[in-house]
Amino acid sequence: MLKKDRLCMALVLAGTIYLLASCGSKAPTPPEDYTLGGDMVESLNTVLGEENSGEMTEMETPETTAEDASSSASVGGAETCYYTYEKLKTGGESVRKYVEKLTAEEDGFQIVDESDTVIDPPDYTAEEGSVVLAKTASEDGKILRMEISWTATDCQITLTRPEGTVGKAEVEPMTYVDAVDFIKSLSPATLGLKADSMAGYSVYPMDGAALVDGILCLKLQVYPPHKEGQANAIAGTYLLSGDKAHLYLLQDHTVRELAL
């Protein structure tokens, strides 16, 4: 009889420990928005939907930290929110969709580097990677910063509000030589030309500049190879932006942007 009582007590104790452990490891409820100070951002689960945002396994905010003094949501003394998602179908693709939504909004985020200078997007097809977003915060002199890292199935998001500003990288002025060399470095297909290479083509910058969609561009004309005595016909007229990010074909008094 005594052995049965001890066995029952052991089973009850084991069940109690299991229930306590289960309660302690309960996953947090995903928020509709991430809030920090006076700023608010749509959450990953809100943008992607419940079916595509995996499972939130961890959430730390200044509010949860106040409730549990044993945890910390502070990095370097700054207010911080921290969220972890697991079981994503594709980590990089999920992050891409989320970032594109946040950067497409009016007065939205911009992709920046460690010094908060605007840069190009990362390679979201990589199995592991990270991206940093920033925008002006509601409090003067501060920015709202989001650091997002991903693996094939996981995603971690950290929000902070450090002091600073979001700036654009300075671009050195483009010279005529730079513009000509850039055009010659492109493939004929990019320029809409039917040739195997740009060898033999001549590129000449034209005086003046043109404004396309608010972008100041340098005008260049491209001439195909020609034999002596033949007329020097124009193969194409192009407009190149100063940062070499935009190239337009000028044809019949209309412009068409070419993919670079």
Image: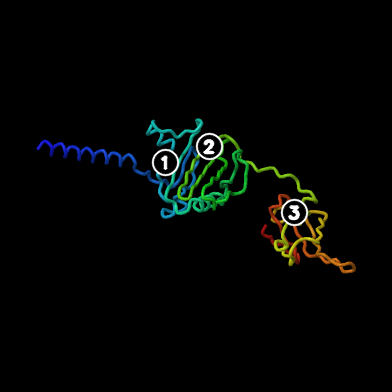
Q: Which residue is mark 1?
A: 59
Residue with the most extreme bottom position: 230
| In-front residue for pair 200/39 | 200
Instruction: Tell me residue 15's x, y (percent).
Output: 23, 41
Indicate the secondary structure of the residue bearing disc 1: strand
Q: Is residue 201 left or right of residue 54?
A: right
| In-front residue for pair 256/139 | 256
| Residue 199 figure quarter | bottom right
- The amino acid type of the residue labelled 3 equals Phe
Contact? badges 3 and 1 (CB < 8 Å): no
Category of crowding for the residue at label 1, using alpha-carbon neighbours closer than 10 angstroms: few (below 14), some (14–19), many (at least 20): many
Q: Is residue 201 left or right of residue 87?
A: right
- The amino acid type of the residue labelled 2 equals Arg
Indicate the secondary structure of the residue bearing disc 3: helix
Give the mark nearest the N terminus, 3 or 2: 2
Classify the position of the N terminus by image quarter: top left
| Residue 138 figure quarter | top right
Q: Between tags 2 and 1, which lies in front?
A: 1
- The amino acid type of the residue labelled 1 equals Met
Q: Between tags 3 and 2, which lies in front?
A: 3
At 72% across and 58% down in the image, what residue appears? Answer: 186
Give the mark nearest the N terminus, 2 or 1: 1
At 45% across and 46% down in the image, what residue appears? Answer: 33
Category of crowding for the residue at label 3, using alpha-carbon neighbours closer than 10 angstroms: few (below 14), some (14–19), many (at least 20): few
Q: Is residue 114 left or right of residue 248?
A: left
Indicate the secondary structure of the residue bearing disc 2: loop
Contact? badges 3 and 2 (CB < 8 Å): no
Q: Which residue is mark 2?
A: 161
